[in-house]
Amino acid sequence: MSRIDKVIMTIILYRSRLCPRCRMAGRILHELTRQRPDLRIEEREFFLAPIQALRAGITMIPAIRIGDQVLSGVFLGRNSIAEFLHRTGCL
């Protein structure tokens, strides 16, 4: 019998620990993906590596990156995050 490995998809959340909007976006992201063990959320502190974040196309936080698609904005609410997750095939 062969073993089939599940593909783990990585969602990157660019944020700052000092940003309340980032904390809220992170909380929503974790809630929406709670039932998906094949998704991994990686949180990156924007201000610790701003050059790498800018090279990845991140110019505003909070920002969520899945593959080559990015969702960012001053306020990321539940609906916009859920729509983004659906559009990218995560939900």
Image (cartoon, grey):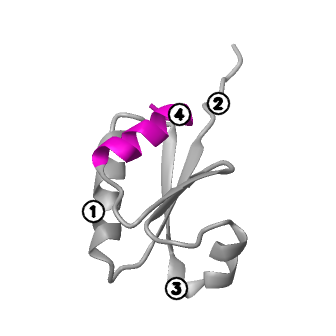
Measured in 3D between alpha carbons, the distance from the residue under mark 1 to the one under mark 2, in whole angstroms, is: 32 Å
Q: Which residues are magenta?
A: 78-91
Instruction: Tell which tag, 1 or 2, sits nearer the viewer.
Output: 1
In the image, 35 versus 16, the foreground residue is 16
Query: Residue 42, relative to residue 5: is it above or below?
Result: below
Please say if the residues under marks 1 and 3 sit with CB atoms less than 8 Å apart. no
How many residues crowd around disc 1 within 10 Å: few (fewer than 14), some, or many (20 or more)? some
Q: Which residue is mark 3?
A: 47
Q: Residue 42 in the image: x percent, y percent?
A: 51, 60
Query: Residue 54, relative to residue 89: is it above or below?
Result: below
Residue 74 sits in which quadrant?
A: bottom left
Measured in 3D between alpha carbons, the distance from the residue under mark 4 to the one under mark 2, in whole angstroms, is: 24 Å
Measured in 3D between alpha carbons, the distance from the residue under mark 4 to the one under mark 1, in whole angstroms, is: 21 Å
Identify the residue at horizontal 34%, vertical 59% (top origin).
Answer: 25
Q: Give the amino acid type for the residue marked by disc 4 in the picture.
A: Arg
Mark 3 or mark 2: whose residue is earlier in sequence: 2
Q: Which residue is mark 4?
A: 87
Query: Residue 51, relative to residue 42: is it above or below?
Result: below
Checking the image for residue 24, the label placed there is 1
27 inside magenta stretch:
no
How many residues crowd around disc 4 within 10 Å: few (fewer than 14), some, or many (20 or more)? few
Q: Would residue 69 be found to the left or right of residue 30 on screen?
A: right
Instruction: Tell which tag, 4 or 1, sits nearer the viewer.
Output: 4
User: Is residue 37 visible to the viewer in this orientation of the structure?
Assistant: no
Q: Give the amino acid type for the residue marked by disc 2 in the picture.
A: Asp
Please say if the residues under marks 4 and 3 sit with CB atoms less than 8 Å apart. no
How many residues crowd around disc 3 within 10 Å: few (fewer than 14), some, or many (20 or more)? few
Checking the image for residue 5, the label placed there is 2
Q: Residue 38 in the image: x percent, y percent?
A: 51, 37
Mark 4 or mark 3: whose residue is earlier in sequence: 3
